[in-house]
Every structure is written in C-alpha cells, then in structure tokens.
Image (tube, rainbow, N blue to C red):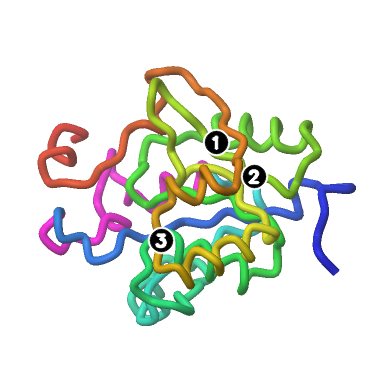
C-alpha cells in the first residue's frame, strides 16, 4: 500500500546525507571528512538533521567499509554511477522511513533551524506525495529537501531514459519549492579546493 500524508509525523522521516562521488575537484579528498571549525563536515550535517530519529548515509557500494568510523547506517547505491538521483532512489527503496530529508555532504553550514523550517512547512502543507526543495536567491537546490517514496516511479522512468539530472526531475515531478533568504547557508556548497580554503 502506498504511503500517504495522512497522519504524517516527523518520526516518519529520516535524515539522508548524500556523499560526494569521487571528489575529483577536491583532488580525491572525501568531503565528509573535511574539517570545519574543528569538526568534520559530516558532524555538522548530522547535527542539522538531528530532529529525525535516524540519519542515513548514502554511499557507493564500498561505503560500508569506507564510512564505518562515522557510526551511521550506510545505504549502498543499488545502481552505482547515477549520481545524486541514484543515491536518493536507493534510499527511497532501502530505508524503512517513507520520507527522506536529503542533504548533500558539501553543505557544512546548514543548520537545524533551517531543516526544521522546511520540515514544518511540509507537515503543515499535508501533501506528502510531493517532493519539496528550497530556493535561495535565484538558485534552486535539489539536494536539500524532502523526498517521499512516491517519487520512485518517476525516478525509475527517468533512469530508464538515461536522464539522471536532478533539475529535470524537480521540473517533471512538479516539486514544491520553498524560498529561503538569499544569503541562506544552504547556498554554500563546497565543491573545490578553492571554495574550501575560502570557507576556512
């Protein structure tokens, strides 16, 4: 039976951290382990997702061994090599919770208040079948928001088409887009060595 939003609670959701692929632009450094203010990126993001009963880590098939020290349950990609869509798809298939609050591993500045704000808006809206992501300034952020299990059929359709672009998925799913402040920390993504040095 498909999950619906009827009676949806925060405890029906889980946090879900997407790892950063091969980190080529970081010269192979794993972004989860990068230091910011004395803590790894992973610790900052896990704390931001602290409202949820469990936080999962999305990873490549070797992730169980690679991330064992983090103490998080690891969800291995069922279809490796598809980027963020493959990671989210794997989580929606594998996690017990029917709703995932997704955050990318390159967003160490996100805060629990922002996560709670998006979650509260989702619960108040009552339409748990819709993907909900955020916009800061003129940028939409597909890798910060809530994905319901009901998104799986469209993901499977796009995967069959060979289209793994999250922006296309957001458009085709008619996702709800919540506007945040232009200077929201959600808009700070660390993808290169230069960006990391500026952050530090």
Report the residue that reaches farthest toward the front: 161
Q: Which residue is mark 3?
A: 164
Residue with the most extreme right position: 7
Closer to viewer: mark 3 or mark 1: 3
Q: Secondary structure at mark 3?
A: loop
Which residue is identified by label 1?
A: 112
Residue at the spot 81% in from the left edge and 60% down from the top edge: 3
- Residue at image x 46%, y 18%? 181
Quadrant position of the N terminus in the picture: bottom right
Of mark 3 and mark 1, the one earlier in the sequence is 1
Mark number for residue 51? 2
Vertical relation: 121 (above or below) 129: above
Give the Cα distance between marks 3 and 2. Answer: 29 Å
Residue 65 image offset from top left, x and y in percent: 37, 81
Taking the spot 25% from the left edge, 42% from the top edge, the residue there is 190
Q: Which residues are magenta?
A: 26-48
Q: Is residue 47 magenta?
A: yes
- Which quadrant is home to the C terminus? top left
- Asked whether disc 1 touches disc 2, contact meaning CB atoms under 8 Å apart, the reply is yes
């Amino acid at each position: 039976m498909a999950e619906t939003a009827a009676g949806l609670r925060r405890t029906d959701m889980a946090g879900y951290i997407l790892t950063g692929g091969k980190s080529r632009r970081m010269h192979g450094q794993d972004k989860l382990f990068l230091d910011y203010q004395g803590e790894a990126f992973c610790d900052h993001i896990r704390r931001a997702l602290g409202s949820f009963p469990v936080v999962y880590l999305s990873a490549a098939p070797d992730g169980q061994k690679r991330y064992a020290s983090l103490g998080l349950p690891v969800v291995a990609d069922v279809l490796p090599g598809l980027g963020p869509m493959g990671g989210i798809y794997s989580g929606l298939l594998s996690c017990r919770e029917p709703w995932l609050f997704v955050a990318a591993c390159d967003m160490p500045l996100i805060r629990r208040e922002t996560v709670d704000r998006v979650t509260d808006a989702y619960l108040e809206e009552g339409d748990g079948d819709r993907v909900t992501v955020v916009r800061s300034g003129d940028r939409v952020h597909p890798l910060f928001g809530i994905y319901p299990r009901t998104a799986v059929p469209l993901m499977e359709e796009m995967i069959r088409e060979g289209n793994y672009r999250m922006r296309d998925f957001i458009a085709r799913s008619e996702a709800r887009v919540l506007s945040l402040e232009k200077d929201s920390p959600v808009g700070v993504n660390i993808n290169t060595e230069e960006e990391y040095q500026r952050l530090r």
